[in-house]
Image: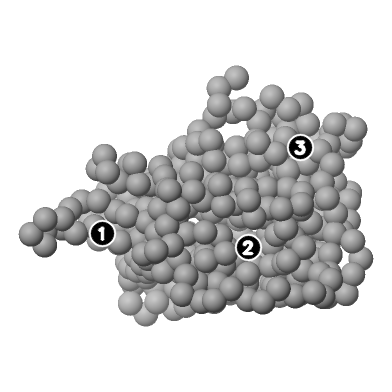
Amino acid sequence: MSAMFRSLSSLNYRIWFAGALVSNVGTWMQRTAQDWIVLTELSDHDAVALGITTALQLGPQLLLVPVSGLIADRFDRRRTLLVTQISMGVLGLGLGVIVLSGLAQLWIVYVFALLLGIASAIDAPVRQTFVAELVSGANVSNAVALNSASFNAARTIGPAVAGLLVAVIGAGWVFLLNAGSFAAVVVSLLFIRRSALVVMARSPRAKGQLLAGFRYVRGRPDLVMLFVIVFIIGTFGFNYQIFVSTMSTSVFGLDSAGFGLLTSVMAVGSVAGALLSASRDKPRVRLIFLACAGFGVSALAAAVSPTLALFAVALVFIGFAGQVMITTANGTVQTTTDQRMRGRVMALYMAIFMGGTPIGAPLLGAVANTFGPRWGLGVAALAGFVAFGAGVFYLVRWRGMRVELGAHGRLRPRLVFGASGAETLTGSLSLAEIGRGAESPAPPESTAPASPDSPESLESPESPGPASATEREEELEDDLALDETEARRA
């Protein structure tokens, strides 16, 4: 089996992958139908109402981050997923019955969006970390990328099918079909061989566990940088449902089928981006920054596209760049985080990524209503450029990136990494210097015993998992060595 699909060699992962693909198709069908009835049936093309619906569905990701992360680290993930998946299926069933009965109102959709958001907030970090139990450690990043490919393959199929079904049989039946799709995940969880699951380190009971994830991330400048970039793009750039729906209806005058087709077109690029990420041996931080710049350029091209065809092409590149960025960031966070903290760190990651939408979705909706849908895309483009600038600042501040001066004061096209006097053989900063800044003195050693979840105990060389200090430093040096080699070739 090719390296791109190496995780599928695991039987448990194949079972999970198949069930998740079916469920993801149903989820995207419901999202498309929900956005359509809010925009066209329950409001007069009000982008703010659509933004509020999105905010209610994603807001719990931010509010429940301490609890959801602790659940992912403390409880059996397979059983937890059974509960959350069944709950979301019941909610889809209830909304479908209400819509078919003709009782649907905007506030009812708001309530269901909030309840679905609560279930999803608990489900997301558990589902993300459960992947590490299905495959060996070396294949975790590949499995994460294939999950993204599955999710976006479903986004290619789901909206297109939903657009046609809404026009033919109505949105209520689409909600019922989504409710049935959750059965695929439930069945896959029941058929997974528990004896073949990878045993993961669990966080023991201790005081301060809710805040331990925040302390751990605070001590990792690389994670802080990734979270900042994910927040910027997730809040102001990944509100696809806002600018695709408003451009579809207000600018190009499309019906529900056309709206679903455009969403699927964007998903084609997303699938390609996820497969590109899956083909790499390990996630590369530099690729995240380049993807942010590509996202900004693509969103700007979409904003000024004069025709539907050019807009559709730009959407493909938006989906591609956005997916490369988010998949690589996701893989980086999972593979460099201590096993005992992975659930809480991923909960915080998902909260920042998805929880920023309650801020961005209404704002983008207001921009689209006031200035037009093209300006909403302009905000997304600006988010991409700002995120790229944040990445460059990180490289300069924490990895000592600079342009080397050549003879006669002329600039040479060569990037050099590592602060003066603090370079390793590969030009990277040592882990201690990255953790506290090259110019800061080393903190005095403490004789107090570290708690089980303290950053000191989690980052010790004896700690299990890929987040030990030695391994992270070696990965950083390898990454920077490749950066220098490719920069010289360029």
Please name the amino acid that badge 1 sits on.
Answer: Val
Q: Which mark is residue 403?
A: 1
Front in this rendered view, residue 490 or 187: 490
Please name the amino acid that badge 3 sits on.
Answer: Leu
Furthest residue toward left: 408
The answer to whether residue 483 shows anywhere in this view is yes
Q: Read off the residue under disc 3.
A: 134
In this rendering, would 271 be left or right of 120? left
Residue 476 drawn at (x, y percent):
51, 51
Quadrant occupied by the N terminus: top right
Furthest residue toward top: 1
| Residue name at image x 59 percent, y 48 percent | 331
Mark 1 vs mark 2: which is more N-terminal?
A: 2
How crowded pointer 2 is (Cα within 10 Å; few <14, some 14-19, many 20+) is rated as many
Q: CA distance from mark 1 to mark 2?
A: 32 Å
In this rendering, would 178 be left or right of 165? right
